[in-house]
């Protein structure tokens, strides 16, 4: 199949599939000798769908790569996979805690300005204009495999 068909079947854009191929998450496609088109097999679609399920769980590319490597060795011990999932779960739990703290900050902001007044007197804007050290620090994000192991 060509990349457009793989994109339709996997739900990824053509650009995303090319990126995943460059990053080694999807194996390189065979190239047509005549027009240099990429030709993908069922294994490419299966890998793309596996990646889609992992991304739906908010897994980083590093985590997905680890799982893909493990998937390629079906006889290997799965303890590393268990540890990866445990680490990811801990990250998600920390993120939930951070989001709950963020929710409380936003509720407090909203509650600070319950009466209609001019922008000049807006308690929300006044709070946001305070020096940064009075605000909660920004939480770590889940970009580029930012789990701390």
Image: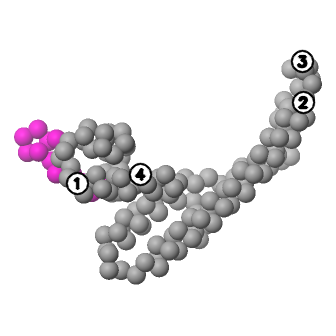
Whether residue 51 sits left or right of residue 84 in the image: it is left
Q: Main secondary structure of the magenta part?
A: loop
Q: Label 4: which residue?
A: 52
Q: Which residues are magenta?
A: 26-37
Number of other residues with Cα within 10 Å of mark 3, as a class: few under 14, some 14 to 19, many 20 or more: few
Q: Of marks 2 and 1, which one's residue comes earlier in the chain?
A: 1
**Inter-mark Cα distance, 2 to 1:** 57 Å
User: In percent of the image, x 86 and y 20: which residue is there?
Assistant: 119
Q: Label 2: which residue?
A: 113
Whether residue 20 sits left or right of residue 89 in the image: it is left
Q: Of marks 4 and 3, which one's residue comes earlier in the chain?
A: 4
The kind of secondary structure element at disc 1 is helix
Number of other residues with Cα within 10 Å of mark 2, as a class: few under 14, some 14 to 19, many 20 or more: some
Q: Nearer the viewer, residue 37 or 109?
A: 109
The kind of secondary structure element at disc 3 is loop
44 magenta-colored:
no
Q: Label 3: which residue?
A: 118
Q: Label 1: which residue?
A: 42
Q: Quadrant of residue 44?
A: bottom left
Residue 84 is tagged as none
Q: Of marks 1 and 3, which one's residue comes earlier in the chain?
A: 1
């Amino acid at each position: 199949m060509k990349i457009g068909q793989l994109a339709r079947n996997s739900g990824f854009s053509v650009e995303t599939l090319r990126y995943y191929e460059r990053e080694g998450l999807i194996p390189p496609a065979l190239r047509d000798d005549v027009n240099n088109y990429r030709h993908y097999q069922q294994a490419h679609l299966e890998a793309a769908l596996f990646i889609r399920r992992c991304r739906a769980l908010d897994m980083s590319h590093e985590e997905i790569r680890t799982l893909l490597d493990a998937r390629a060795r079906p006889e290997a011990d799965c303890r590393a996979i268990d540890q990866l999932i445990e680490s990811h779960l801990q990250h998600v739990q920390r993120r939930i805690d951070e989001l709950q703290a963020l929710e409380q900050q936003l509720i407090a902001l909203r509650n600070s300005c319950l009466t209609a007044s001019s922008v000049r007197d807006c308690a929300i804007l006044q709070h946001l204009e305070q020096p940064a050290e009075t605000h909660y620090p920004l939480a770590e994000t889940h970009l580029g495999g930012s789990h701390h192991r």
